[in-house]
Amino acid sequence: MDLRLKKLDWYIIKKFMATFFVSMLLIIGLVIIFDVSEKIDDFISHNASLHDIVFYYYVNFVPYFINMFSPLFIFITVIFFTSRMAANSEIIAILSGGVSYHRMMVPYLLSALFVALLSLVLNLYVVPKANKTRLEFEAVYIKNENSYKRNDIHYQIAPGKFVYVKSFSSWNNTAYNMTIETLEGNKLVSKLTAENAAWDSATDSWKLRNYVLREYSRGMSDRVTTGAALDTALALTVSDFYRNNKTVQTLTSPELSKLIATQKMRGDGSIIYAQIEQHNRLVLPFSTIILTIMGVCLSSRKRRGGIGWSLVAGIALTFTYILFLRFSQMFVFTGTLSPGIALWLPNVLYVFITAFLYKLAPK
């Protein structure tokens, strides 16, 4: 098979990319209009300036939206312009000219690979930074989530070292009823309790007040030390208390991997949010290639009634895929499947569906 790009290949690539970007701009424009109408009351009530709305929110909202619905964009693109080509008998002319169905797929795959790589770069580096600004804007002007309420927090901050906090106040960055336990093997070596612990940003340490340190000895007596104040450095910062399930969306790929490693060591149950985000960033770009092949298979045949049936079938399959991808996350939260298996399961299933459709398409 000759894989050198020819006029026909560039013709399909240009149609692919032009339709993709035009459809994306049109859909994004409509989404922004509906989003403004929904949030206009929040913007007005919180006195958000036009500059902040445009440059802090919507400029950063666009990459987030593209990332979330890229499978829908790519599928609609392929279905639309391939159906038009089939309706104009261009597909029949291509195949009649001696070009095999497999060779005709080459420009589609090259275009899909370009979009997939673009989506991957956005997911790993651009979207996290955009999400950080967008979520900060939402916290102030839309959802007003300035107050973080955390209770009954358990962390393993190092091997054999555990921290428990009864409650944390974001108003003064103070942890109340803090307990720090140190174990060697299965033996409790020391236990440090404090009425409260305030974060000192100047020294990056915690200032414990009204503390009691009990050191357990091998003999009959224990050593007990009390005091009004104690400075202590822990592998736990105030930012750990401000982290929620959306924080992972603001981390670049290296930062996300580092967070997962830390949460594994701590036994932090919220690690599933980071793991889901990590796999999502790879799953969506990969789905671009799958949905491109599926779109060609569904729309390359000339049908009576034009492109209507192909568009309906394509949109239905795309929404089914996105719904399946979201639903598969429930298997992670319930502990039924690991994040890796659950998030990649829709792609694996659609690979088989696409392989079946591709086998039938040349016939």
Image (spheres, helix red, strand yellow):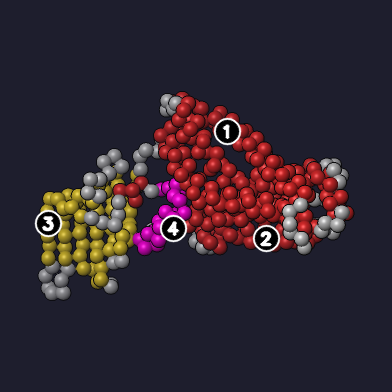
Location of mark 1 (residue):
32
Q: CA distance from mark 2 to mark 3?
A: 64 Å
Rendering coords of residue 159 (x, y %): 31, 66
Q: Residues within 10 Å of mark 3 (few under 14, many from 20)?
A: some
- Of the two numbered discs 4 and 2 in the rendering, the one whose residue sits closer to the viewer: 4
Which mark, by number, is residue 226? Answer: 3
Residue drawn at 54 percent across, 30 percent down: 36
Residue drawn at 74 percent across, 48 percent down: 10
> Does any portion of residue 32 appear in the rendered image?
yes
Of the pair 250 and 221, the residue shown nearer to us: 250
Q: Secondary structure at mark 3?
A: strand
Which callout, 2 or 1, points at the residue further toward the start of the chain? 1
Q: 134 above or below 184?
A: above
Q: CA distance from mark 1 to mark 4?
A: 32 Å
Does residue 25 appear to the left or right of 140 in the view shown? Answer: right
* Residue type at numbered disc 1: Ile
Q: CA distance from mark 3 to mark 1?
A: 59 Å
Dominant secondary structure, magenta: helix
Q: Residues within 10 Å of mark 1 (few under 14, many from 20)?
A: some
Location of mark 2 (residue):
351
Does residue 166 appear to the left or right of 128 in the view shown? Answer: left
- Of the two numbered discs 2 and 3 in the rendering, the one whose residue sits closer to the viewer: 2
The residue segment tinted magenta is: 244-266
Residue placed furthest toward the bottom:
219
Look at the image and tell me in which quarter the C terminus lies.
bottom right
* Residue type at numbered disc 2: Val
Q: CA distance from mark 4 to mark 2?
A: 28 Å
Query: Was residue 246 drawn as part of the magenta stretch in this picture?
Result: yes
Location of mark 4 (residue):
257
Q: Residues within 10 Å of mark 2 (few under 14, many from 20)?
A: some
